[in-house]
Amino acid sequence: MVFAKLDRLTRNVDLLRSLVASDVDLVFCDLPSVPPGPMGKVLLTQMASVAELEAGLIGERTKKALAATKARSEARQPQRCSCSPWEADRQC
């Protein structure tokens, strides 16, 4: 199987380990060459671990940014006027 990048295949180490254990030939265009045997397995596992970490960090940053945006938008919302539209001369 040929993949453009390792992180496009999976960001889950367990899935990658199962593919490597099934003796499927894996080729990644972003890695020069993956040696066969235990060295290749270690290399792929480490790369997948970094990709999994990266995905987790991106998720954390996204959640924090969404929470901050929500807090800012709630703080900026103007108070709704309880006046009816027919009371134009009245200040709210």
Image (cartoon, grey):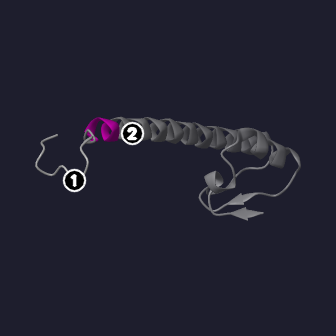
| Residue 72 coordinates in the image, percent (x, y) | 31, 38
Residue 28, quarter of picture? bottom right
**Residue tagged 1:** 86
| Residue 81 coordinates in the image, percent (x, y) | 25, 42
- Quadrant of the image for the N terminus? bottom right
**Residue tagged 2:** 70
Residue 61, quarter of picture? top left
Kind of residue sitting beneath label 1 = Trp
Q: Residue at x 12, y 42 (%)?
A: 91
In primary-sequence order, the first of circles 2 and 1 is 2
SS type, badge 1 = loop
Looking at the picture, tell me which residue is in the foreground, 3 or 86: 86
| Residue 50 coordinates in the image, percent (x, y) | 58, 39
Query: Mark 2 and 1 residues: CB-CB less than 8 Å, in contact?
Result: no
Q: Which is closer to the viewer, label 2 or label 1?
A: 1
| Residue 24 coordinates in the image, percent (x, y) | 85, 55
Question: From which residue to which does the magenta span run?
Answer: 72-77
Residue 77 located left or right of residue 26:
left
For residue 35, above or below residue 73: below
| Secondary structure character of the magenta stretch overall | helix
Q: Using a 10 Å C-alpha cutoff, classify the residue at mark 1 as few (fewer than 14 neighbours), some (14 to 19) or many (20 or more).
A: few
Q: Residue at x 17, y 40 (%)?
A: 92
